[in-house]
Image: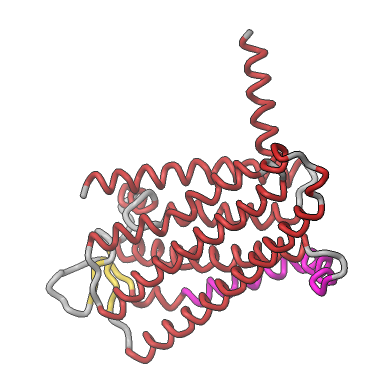
Amino acid sequence: MSSFKNILYFQAGLGVLANMFLLCFYIFIIIGHRPKPTDLISCQLTFIHIMMFLTGGDLFLTNIFESLNIDNDFKCKATFYISRVMRGLSICTTCFLSVFQAVTISPSTSLLAKFKQKLKQYMIHVFLCIWSFNLSYSSNRIFYVRGFTNLSETNQMQVTKSCSLFRMNYIIKVLIFTVTTSRDVFLVGVMLTTSTYMVIILCRHQRQFKHLHSISHLRASPEKRATQSILLLVICFVVTYWVDFIISSTSVLLWIYDPVILRVQKFVMYAYPTISPLVQISSDNRIIIMLKNMHLKHHQSFF
């Protein structure tokens, strides 16, 4: 059990470092250079992923609260609320990024082309709507999370080392489950649709210009890299998100939360925030060029 916890710490550490690097890069690009519109969305998504790691269960932020001797009830409510907000923001922002990319690469003759300028113009409004919805929607969880007191009480379920989830009214529980499921199904459906559309557009573009490339150059073409990145991120997000959703929903509905299942859920929950920045770093030419220049300068100064 302790070895699996070490794996979680390693996974979280790798994810935080990768996302911190990516966040610093996006801030540098946004402040000092001409950022692409998707950079603003990716920057926000990277920040969300960092917060997901910091508020995840018994890791990082929980240990900070313990060292400050903060009230257990407040600690549980704060970490659980922020964690649920970030989870909702993650799927909403990933969906928005997918839609924005699909509109951006759409041909000028398509119906989506007319929304290119509108999306850029109203991007801040979309951010405000996404944050407002998730901050308000997740607020109901505050009333059902408290510090863990006594294992013999049947109306509470231990979800972390020091926090418990208390039973809620059946109608409220069904309502929350229905709204959450509807939201997730809709957003994942939009992501799959837009990602399929992007793959079709990129493959069509690659076939049109295939005669301009040699076979060796085609393997490393930007179109193919973008297609592979989109497929990998979408597949990874959909699989991990729904496994996490099924485990958490089943545990709440059946009122059973096994410690082993909880650790597996954390591992699955951290998979996408860990893989996502690594894929973005490896597929963004600006980052690759920057790292090569840094290595070259370090090499020259060394000699």
The relative height of residue 232 versus residue 294 in the rendered view (above or below) is below
Is residue 71 located in the magenta-colored stretch of the structure? no
Q: Position of residue 297 (x, y in %)?
A: 68, 19
Residue at left offset 71%, top offset 57%? 203
Is residue 129 located in the magenta-colored stretch of the structure? yes
Residue at left offset 63%, top offset 18%? 298
Residue at left offset 64%, top offset 66%? 196
Location of residue 152 by image quarter: bottom left
Q: Along the horizontal axis of the image, is 104 left or right of 303?
A: right
Location of residue 38 by image quarter: bottom right
Q: 110 or 265: which is nearer to us?
A: 110
Q: Position of residue 178 (x, y in %)?
A: 45, 85
In the displayed orientation, state which residue is furthest to the top: 303
Q: Position of residue 232 (x, y in %)?
A: 55, 55
The relative height of residue 292 versus residue 48 in the rendered view (above or below) is above
Q: Position of residue 168 (x, y in %)?
A: 32, 84
The relative height of residue 283 versus residue 116 in the rendered view (above or below) is above
Specify start and end residues of the magenta stretch as a single range: 110-138
